[in-house]
Amino acid sequence: MNAHGIDFAGSALTLLSSGLLWWEAERTLCASDLHLGKSERHARRGGSLLPPYETGDTLQRLDAAITALGPARVICLGDSFDDAAALGGLAEEERLWLLRLMAGRDWVWIEGNHDPGPLDVDGRHLAELTLGPLTFRHIAEDGASPGEISGHWHPKIAVNARGSRVARPCFVTDGSRLIMPAFGTYTGGLFADAPPVGRLMERSRTLAILTGEPMARLPVFSMPKGKRPGAMRAPPRLRRRA
């Protein structure tokens, strides 16, 4: 499993190539912006018709990570469903699949702007969650204390690939905040240097950690001379569940 380790607010975190975050010390897996039911929501609202397979694909990738890591806790960092009605629009097998993934785990649904308020599904429904030095919320807040982990913006960055520019989802961090990429299959993104993201970050220290293969870290903004971004450590060996 391709991964990068970072020291964040005194905690050893592992950023996975899939776009998930693994906090081994707390056996906690975090996913942001699943947007389950997006194709159903588009069809229901008379929008463009999308192939209705994204929920199954998103659940399959999440299932693979849960099987490999065996987390005791899963945090879904908001916009888990594409709107408040999307849960009811899931196929029965998709709903049962989700319930199987949740079984026996502390499953936390953080409220998002697409799915505010408690939904008719098991688990804990919270506006935000603080665990030790880390606070998990959907949208980064101005003036937040160090250790904030959020989603919402679906950050991406343009890179050169085989002579052309392509956009890849990424984690964005300045060592104080961490913004996660969207995990859902049908999710676009906002460039990491766009004003809504840039105004939150200490620009001289802001890194993008690319998802996919290969993972890489890149400065988001031009680095002033003599400045270096915070170092990343080698990730720990990821232990699969026995």
Image (cartoon, rainbow, N blue to C red):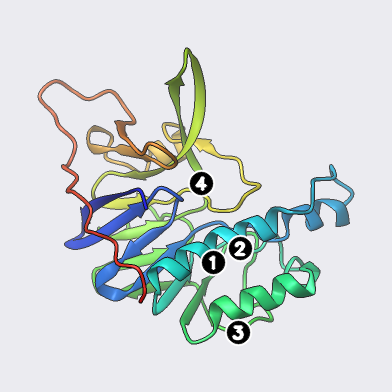
Which residue shows up at 55% across the image and 58% down it?
61
Answer few, some or many: residues within 10 Å of disc 1's Cα (few below 14, many 20 plus, some between 14 and 19). some
Is residue 224 shown left or right of residue 221? left
User: Rounded to the nearest whole Å, what is the CA distance between mark 1 and mark 2?
Assistant: 6 Å
Q: Earlier in the sequence, mark 1 or mark 4?
A: 1
- Please tell me the numbered disc located at residue 227: none
Secondary structure of the residue carrying numbered label 1: helix
Answer few, some or many: residues within 10 Å of disc 2's Cα (few below 14, many 20 plus, some between 14 and 19). many
Residue occupied by mark 2: 59
Closer to the eye: label 1 or 3:
1
- Please tell me the numbered disc located at residue 122: 3
Q: Please state the horizontal and vertical placement of residue 197, each as a whole percent of the image.
A: 43, 40
Is residue 231 shown left or right of residue 61? left
Secondary structure of the residue carrying numbered label 2: helix
Q: Is residue 118 visible?
A: no
- The amino acid pointed to by label 4 is Trp
Residue occupied by mark 1: 63
Q: Earlier in the sequence, mark 1 or mark 3?
A: 1
Q: Is residue 219 above or below residue 147?
A: above
Q: Please state the horizontal and vertical placement of residue 166, each as a whole percent of the image.
A: 51, 25
- Please tell me the numbered disc located at residue 153: 4
